[in-house]
Image (cartoon, grey):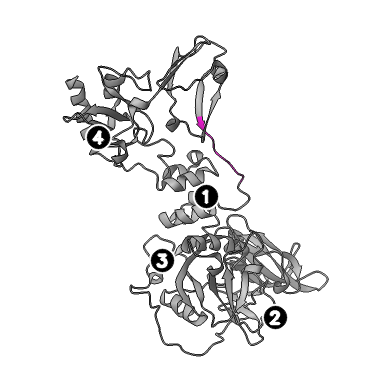
Amino acid sequence: MKHNLGIFVSILSVACCLDSQCDDMDSDLCKTFNLHVNVCSNPCLSKICPRTCDKCPRKCYSCNDANSLDNCNTTRICPDRTYKCLVHEGIASDFSITYQLGCATNLVCSSLFGNGRVLGRRKKKSINGECCNSDLCNKHDPSKKRQIVISLETTTTEIITNRTDVITNSTIGSMNPTSTPITNELTFNATQDNIKSSFMTSTNTKGTTTVVPVITTSKIPGCADIDTASCQKLASLKRDMCSDDCFVHVCPRTCGKCPECYSCIFMDTPENCTDRSVCSLGEKCYVVEKYLDNGEHGYRAGCLHEDVCTRFHINAGNVFGRRSDHLGLILDGDCCNGDLCNHHPIIHTTSTTTTTHAPTHAPTHTTTHAPTQPQSTTTPPDGCMYVAGHHCPTGFSLVEGKCLFIGTELSTYESAKISCKYHCSNLLENISDRDIDSIRILMDSVFWGLPNDRKVIILGAHTDSHNHLVWDTSRQRVPGVPRDLHGNDCLVLEGHGGHRGPHDHLLKPSSCDDIHYYICEAKFK
């Protein structure tokens, strides 16, 4: 007896001092992803969720001489997969009950509690305890366990328990084999701690019973993230994820790989195109100016694969002025980057990297402001600091292929612009419906606990000389806002709309002197 306990304590001491790097990147993130897809069959998610996929050594509670199981909150990862979690109830020198918890080898478990066929509690030489083979399964009082033994050779069921629970033959009738059983006896733990609603039992034609996770699956429509909130969290933990094509397929929208574009076969001006479409992975927005065969002048807009865009851009000199069976006589045009960037004519340039928007813009305000910094900022500006390999600067979140930062100081429009400039960024502009969906998720995270009616952020737009709301940089009109601005000269986004879908109603004209929170966009690398 002393020899066995000596081995037991020795094994616990060694195992408790070892650790492993095999663990989920974030257990809650893995659980959330698993509600939408089977993470263990996904080549990318399985890499960041190895524990969820049962590819890691066991994680066990680990304490020596704990006077209460509730007081044991230390956990350890066992040295390798040959270890199980163990709990043992003993008596201290003052005759008080103590508990030993930790990792133990299969040999120790068999020596102390049985030959491995019994997975429940077994007393041997007055040892009260058990080994179990799942993460954090060893935080329970072994004296309160019950054991259910089901004989597969007959329809007679023997129930061994120190409780009054009763399971009838009809309850487990579906588990009786219809052919020669593979094993003579199946014993399993039936404590409520081990019965999870997330698992179900299935029986195959050979009578073998298996336990499989119940996973809620959903078909991912087109080019969409598996789950936007999870992808945003993943981007904050793995800040270079969009450099890996594997993760791009998991979170294409977060990586900005399938933009939303205006899509019309023919219209007199791009601004009159109201239909939108979400491009497939690897496509960009485009707009071309053309003449139809009947001499009618107009534009065509939509999505085009980026490889075709590249060839179109390089060979434009051989395309413009020539007839196309599909496009008519092409006069000008090009592809562009970002959501809804094709809502105006695009003038092709000779540079392979530069596309000029027409009309070219000029700032509407010539007043020079003092370089006032946000009062709450006492460290170097985050937006100016990029870590090698990261897509976004420090402090910015990756949302829909954009690096965004929500300022939590109440500001006017002018103060918000200065704050963004201090962070080497600009007020966010030119946003789509799908941008708004994802920005609202980010707002909920940043403004957790804030009343919904206060979740309002300033965008990069102002009124021009014609009293139209235009984006600060492109000088293009903001679509979907009322023509009558009632004297308002700036634009805000409200984050508390009641539904998903078209979000023009969430873009509201506002006075530039009103104070709200704000959102900045930095360069995506």
Which residue matches tag 3? 393
Q: Please report the residue visible at 38 percent of the width from the left and 22 percent of the height from the top.
A: 119
Q: Is residue 351 left or right of residue 238?
A: right
In the rendered structure, which disc, 1 or 2, sits on the residue that comes first in sequence? Answer: 1
Above/below status of 44 relative to 311? above
Above/below status of 72 relative to 6? below
Q: Is residue 384 left or right of residue 271?
A: left
Contact flag, marks 2 and 4 (Cβ < 8 Å):
no
Disc 3 packing (10 Å; few <14; some 14–19; many ≥20)? many
Above/below status of 35 relative to 321? above
Report, in whole angstroms, how far the alpha carbon at label 1 lies from the one at label 2: 42 Å
Which residue matches tag 1? 250
Report, in whole angstroms, how far the alpha carbon at label 3 lies from the one at label 1: 22 Å
Name the quadrant of the C terminus. Answer: bottom left
Q: Is residue 70 left or right of residue 447?
A: left
Measured from the top left, where is residue 250 in percent x and y?
52, 49
The magenta segment is 212-219
Disc 2 packing (10 Å; few <14; some 14–19; many ≥20)? few
In the rendered structure, which disc, 2 or 4, sits on the residue that comes first in sequence? Answer: 4
Which residue matches tag 4? 15
Report, in whole angstroms, how far the alpha carbon at label 3 lies from the one at label 4: 41 Å
Task: Say what amino acid the circle numbered 4 marks.
Answer: Ala
The numbered mark at residue 506 is none
Q: Quadrant of residue 48?
A: top left
Q: Please report the residue visible at 44 percent of the width from the left and 14 percent of the height from the top.
A: 185
Q: Is any part of residue 359 visible from this angle?
A: yes
Q: Nearer the viewer, mark 1 or mark 2?
A: 2
